Image (tube, grey):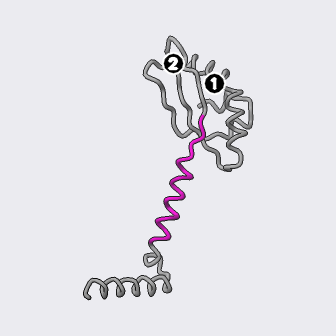
Amino acid sequence: MLGNHIKNETAKMAIITDVDCSRDLERAKVYFTTLDPSDRERVGEALLGAAGAMRSHLGKLLALRQVPSLSFHIDSSADYGQSIDLILDSLRPVADGNEDAQEQAGEEEQSCSKQVGE
């Protein structure tokens, strides 16, 4: 929506993931990410530089008495989700058809059942 109205090419690299507005609509926290994690700081600075132009355009689009001030925050939820996926993948070696892992899981299961039965 705002991409056509922002001149800064670096700011256009942002992928807006969420916006959290205060109850009185005076402030809006804009969460963003980028395709390349190494670009996030640079894109955040570019977004800060483009905030005035964004607010101006939002003022024309929205029927609000006051346009919210914008603050930009890196959204690391995708990174967190990816780390959770990696953990879950490491716990499911049997489901992936890894024969060594299946054997190891079978041995662990037998070991546990022996301890319980003793």
Q: Element under label 1?
A: helix
Q: Residue at x 39, y 86 (%)?
A: 106
Q: Residue at x 44, y 72 (%)?
A: 92
Mark 1 is on which residue type? Met
Q: Could you say where residue 5 lies in the image, as x and y percent from the top left?
A: 67, 27
Q: Is residue 89 left or right of residue 54?
A: left
Query: Extreme front residue here?
Result: 118
Question: Magenta span has 76?
Answer: yes
Which residue appears at 61% of the width and 32% of the height? 72
Q: Nearer the viewer, mark 1 or mark 2?
A: 2
Q: Which percent across, then down, holds residue 91?
A: 45, 71
As drawn, 63 above or below 86: above
Residue marked by disc 2: 26
- Mark 2 secondary-structure assignment: loop
Q: Amino acid at mark 2?
A: Glu
Which one is earlier in the sequence, the residue at label 1 or at label 2?
2
Q: Is residue 19 left or right of residue 114?
A: right
Magenta stretch mostly in which secondary structure?
helix
Q: Position of residue 4 (x, y in %)?
A: 67, 30
Residue 95, quarter of picture: bottom left
Q: In this picture, is 110 found above or below 10?
A: below
Q: Report the disc number at residue 54.
A: 1
In the image, which residues are magenta? 73-91
